[in-house]
């Protein structure tokens, strides 16, 4: 198990679930206090045809970490973005890291909104699934822009 301060420094003192700031000086017993959450994401099939998992620890608020134990985690899209039909981030990332390929994750009304959403999503995924590399492409179509997420 990693040291709380080391995990906090690496993750920029941001909660991987709610993306909110975590106070490093708060009590670990406080709801908004820091905690370390262990997780594993499935890796794609290895050369032997077996699936493995990548394990890692991430920083979370104690309350976010506790709530995750009761219900499946949800990584919300930012309310500052203009996106429509946004796909659930957790399920999409798990599917892409397991199967590969690409998926449309949202629609945006114009190119500027699409680029803003793509930058936000890449930044968010760098904390949610730091062991993977993603790319997001804004593709025009039908008077709107589709955000297409791909695991590299």
Image (tube, grey):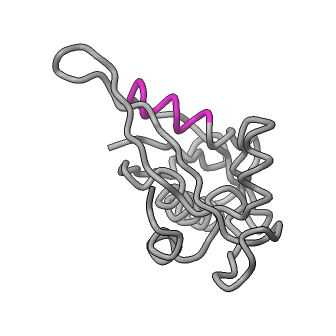
Task: Answer whether residue 47 is magenta in the image.
Answer: no
Q: Image quadrant for the N terminus?
A: bottom left
Residue placed at 47% from the left, 50% from the top? 129
Residue located farthest toward the left when viewing the structure as drawn: 47
Among the 4 quarters of the image, the one containing residue 19: bottom right
Residue located farthest toward the bottom when viewing the structure as drawn: 25
Residue placed at 24% from the left, 13% from the top? 49
Q: Nearer the viewer, residue 79 or 29?
A: 29
Q: Is residue 102 left or right of residue 37?
A: left
Residue placed at 74% from the left, 44% from the top? 68
Q: Is residue 112 left or right of residue 5?
A: right
- Count of picture labels: 0
Q: Main secondary structure of the magenta part?
A: helix
Residue placed at 16% from the left, 21% from the top? 47
Image: magenta residue range: 91-100
| Rendered view: 53 above or below 133 | above
| Rendered view: 110 above or below 90 | below
Q: Position of residue 91 (x, y in %)?
A: 62, 33
Q: Image quadrant for the C terminus?
A: top left
Q: Position of residue 15 (x, y in %)?
A: 65, 65
Q: Is residue 21 left or right of residue 70?
A: left
Q: Is residue 4 left or right of residue 134?
A: right
Q: Position of residue 130 (x, y in %)?
A: 42, 55
Residue located farthest toward the top when viewing the structure as drawn: 49
Q: Nearer the viewer, residue 102 or 125?
A: 125
């Amino acid at each position: 198990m990693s040291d709380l301060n080391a995990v906090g420094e690496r993750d920029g003192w941001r909660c991987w679930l709610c993306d909110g700031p975590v106070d490093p000086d708060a009590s670990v017993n406080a709801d908004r206090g820091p905690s370390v959450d262990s997780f594993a994401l499935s890796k794609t099939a290895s050369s032997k045809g077996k699936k493995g998992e990548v394990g890692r620890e991430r920083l979370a608020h104690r309350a976010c970490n506790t709530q995750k134990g009761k219900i499946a985690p949800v990584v919300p899209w930012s309310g500052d973005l203009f996106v429509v039909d946004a796909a659930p981030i957790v399920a999409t990332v798990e599917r892409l890291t397991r199967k590969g390929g690409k998926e449309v994750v949202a629609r945006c009304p114009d190119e500027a909104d699409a680029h803003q959403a793509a930058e936000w999503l890449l930044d968010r995924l760098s904390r949610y699934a730091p062991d993977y590399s993603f790319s997001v492409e804004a593709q025009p179509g039908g008077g709107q822009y589709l955000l297409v997420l791909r695991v590299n």
